Image: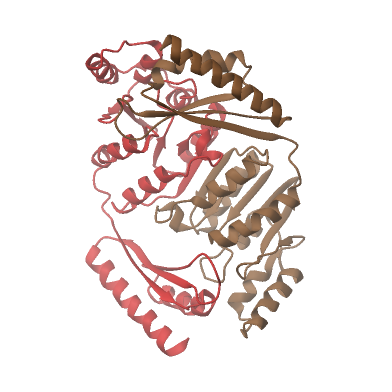
Chain colours: A brown, B red
Amino acid sequence: MSIGNEIVKGRTVNTNASDISSFLTNSGYEISYVLACRDIKEEIGNSLEFLVKKCDIIITTGGLGPTVDDITVESIALYLKLELVINEHAYSEISTKLTKRGMEFTPERLKMALMPAGSEILHNNVGTAPGMILKHDGKIIFSIPGVPSEMRAMLPGISSFLGPSGMEYYSLEYDVKGLLESKIAPYVKELIKKYNYEMLVKTHPESGNTLNRKVTIEIYGYGKSKKRLETLAQEIKEEIDNIILTKL
Amino acid sequence: MSIGNEIVKGRTVNTNASDISSFLTNSGYEISYVLACRDIKEEIGNSLEFLVKKCDIIITTGGLGPTVDDITVESIALYLKLELVINEHAYSEISTKLTKRGMEFTPERLKMALMPAGSEILHNNVGTAPGMILKHDGKIIFSIPGVPSEMRAMLPGISSFLGPSGMEYYSLEYDVKGLLESKIAPYVKELIKKYNYEMLVKTHPESGNTLNRKVTIEIYGYGKSKKRLETLAQEIKEEIDNIILTKL
């Protein structure tokens, strides 16, 4: 869940979302939705309402800073009807950073230490605002900053809090020139069925001219054993290569 | 609403969303949410349900092609309880393209002509699958392909169908070196209030080192007159420059 007008109105490309998703996908987690909303309390609440119903884990980015439009934690507390308190760990982390730079604890900076009661913090080694970890109703909500370098630096903390997913993800991609999606489509459909949907096959046509354009074939799946996924992917690739050679 | 596993799992950065949003923002439309979901009927239905409740106009990208995971139109029909029929205009557009290339109308290609009864089509001058325009319950749903070159080529069609928004958008951005967000935050808060929230001011810190990093100041807003927005933005910029010079 990406919070920020700049994302929603298209000023900023949402690379945070793809960075977080690919990080978690490669750790075996399945992502269901990516939602971006504006810096508006009600819309943050609506977004959270949707995601809390559908997902076990929610990661928000953005809106943790000292400015007037940084309202993420406040909105989460409001929507979940939780009391906002000064988190002592957040307070001391911010305080140490400010002292080091000879800066004062202004009300704007104090805001970064406010979190719903019972929250834990995620250390921010790059910027000032700590992240938040909130367990609520069997769900886990992480809130991390939207500045990409700060967001990235906090992914290992999320990962170690969550622990291993117990699943592996594997993906094999390669390009085929002059292939038409619509020609290979019926074979891919049968192939996926044959492998019991354990692996999926997607064809991504290159942007540009339809004729002679390149298609990227992506074979991927989740499972308990990476080795098995690799073997399956290789088997499927050979079947596809054979279909292209003999039937198209 | 971006449909596709590749977006949600972070394989593909969602530049379609930012391209569409910035195109519409610059035409004076306000975007409220950007939502990405997987190629799963139920999740497409859930996403549509959320957006239909909150927005007047919904644009979906992806899932219009001939492959087994291209299920956008089918899922929209299912969720809105509409009958899928062969759209004659879509049929003839696809047919013309196939004939030109000496290709047959296979079941996979026929799928691209199926649309809910009452839909209009959006011409696709780049690829094969036409887009869909569906008016439903006072809302408008556009479905366009996910291949970026095809998506971009269809934006003018969406724009001309919607007509002028009646609003203008204006944004002024510039960088300030060595500025701290938290220092200028209280002044920005007062400034926005002084201008009655007609214009918003956002500070975007550069990713990287906290000290001496650059902050981009963004002054923006919607209004009836572009000239007035420009004048306001310039006035606010001068006030900010003055605050930086005299108070920080």
Give the percent coordinates (x, y) of residue B131.
33, 29
Quarter of the view holding residue A157: bottom right
Look at 24% across and 48% down and name the residue there.
Answer: B164
Left or right: A120 in relation to B59: right
Tally of marks: 0
Look at 69% across and 78% down and name the residue there.
Answer: A95
- B180, B11: nearer the viewer: B11
Q: Is residue A5 above or below residue A187?
A: below
- A217, B132: nearer the viewer: A217
Q: Is residue B176 visible?
A: yes
- Name the residue furthest bottom: B246
Look at 62% across and 68% down and name the residue there.
Answer: A129
Q: Is residue B190 above or below residue B165?
A: below
Quarter of the view holding residue A112: bottom right
Give the percent coordinates (x, y) of residue A189.
51, 16
Quarter of the picture containing the N terminus of chain B is top left
Left or right: A240 in relation to A60: left
Give the percent coordinates (x, y) of residue B176.
41, 75
Give the percent coordinates (x, y) of residue B48.
49, 35
Left or right: A102 in relation to A18: right
Q: Is residue A146 visible?
A: no
Q: Is residue A227 above or below residue B220?
A: above
Left or right: B223 in relation to A153: left
- B150, A230: nearer the viewer: A230
